[in-house]
Amino acid sequence: MTRRAGLWALICLFASCDASIARAELAATLKVTADPVQPAHVPILLTLTIRNAGTEPISYWRGSAGGYPDASSFTAAISYAGRTRTVLADRLSNSNGQFASGAGRMRALKPGESASFPAALRPLPPGTYSIYVAGEPQGRVENGRFGDIWFPATWSQPLRVEIRYDEKLAAGRDADLIARVRKGDPFAQHVAARFPRPQVQKALEQDLSGDDIVAAEGAMDALWPDYNPSTDAAPLIAKAIRSHLKPINDGHDEWLLQVLLRMSGRFRAPEVQAAVKELAAARPEGRVHRYAQSTLLNFPTPTATKTPDRSDDLVEELLINTLVKSKDPKTRAHAYESLAAYPNSQRAIDTVMAGISDDDPSVRTAAEKAWKTMKAARPNPTQQP
């Protein structure tokens, strides 16, 4: 079996295709380049270049933040240099899942045009390897078979790469990756997330609490690409929230804080809840304040044998203080609506009743609605508005 036939069999193994695809009229070439020497224990970084070698346009889906093709449709066949037997076949990667989100568009390459994009391959043990890359065809599928093809199958020439133990080279790779994450490079964020390294992780954790918002957002995306941190991340998230209590003039930290609050809402850790309370108090108005309020109201409650008494809850205290201090009608209205969850608290009742006389009609409406909810939860209320 020739090398190309073997690669074609590899494509069909992953893509569940049939040999009739090989007769597609479209044509494209694939070139793979990389640094000839790469450090061990570090992902191998490749650059793939596709060129339209046919007479008709070819198209591919671009759905990543970087706007490049999905590298997972390309498979690397790895053998020891000078040998033909494949010792590993593995899909490449360059995305943290954006391609599956449905957002994106098709891009067409006219005859003679080319496009280059990055891809990562898992770390390999020290040695010298030949890496062949095969790209799956893309198109419309009907009944498990391609009814139409808009991107043909591709094969690369062998790429020779030496993997060696080299701490200096590995440290340089880490430093470059950190710098690119800080600039918001989506591929660097993907590599940092998919192939975590201690020095990179340490730098990202520091960036998350730093003053550079772009670097902090990049660190967040690299540390938790799916925004679903494990429970041991609670101290880090609490620290990050506390480091961004003070608002910045241009408001560019709102997205960062919104995601941090969304992630913190799944923790029962007191330190996280305390940090969210501090944020809400530090920003008494605006969207960040409302995000923090909503997060406090939706923190998971610990399992108990009876319903806990919430009359002295920190959330209630925060809402009442907000009603007194806030100049924003939307904030006041939201706080009144939230106080409806405290029908057994006399402080909450008194505050809601006072809100029925608010100067703003939307706030009065919210307070009246809250009072009706509280009254329904109290069969024998002692007070009426």
Image: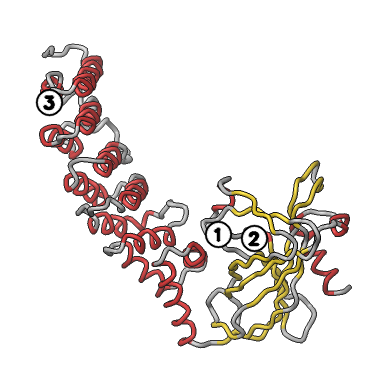
Disc 3 or 2, which lies upstream in sequence? 2
Residue 322 is left or right of residue 84, and the answer is left
What distance separates the C-alpha of mark 3 from that of mark 2? Answer: 57 Å
Label 1: state its secondary structure.
loop
Mark 1 and 2 residues: CB-CB less than 8 Å, in contact?
yes
Residue at image point 39% right, 62% down: 219
Question: Which residue carries the number 2 mark?
Answer: 72
Instruction: Please tell me how crowded label 2 is: few (under 14), some (14-19), or many (20+) other residues with Cα within 10 Å.
Output: some
Question: First in sequence: mark 1 or mark 2?
Answer: 2
> Callout 2: helix, strand or loop?
helix
Label of residue 95 in the image: 1
* Pointer 1 or 3: first along the chain: 1
Circle 1/circle 3 CB separation < 8 Å:
no
Q: Which mark is residue 351?
A: 3
| Residue 47 occupies quadrant | bottom right
The disc at residue 289 is: none
Q: Nearer the viewer, residue 207 or 89?
A: 207
**Quadrant of the frame with the C terminus:** top left
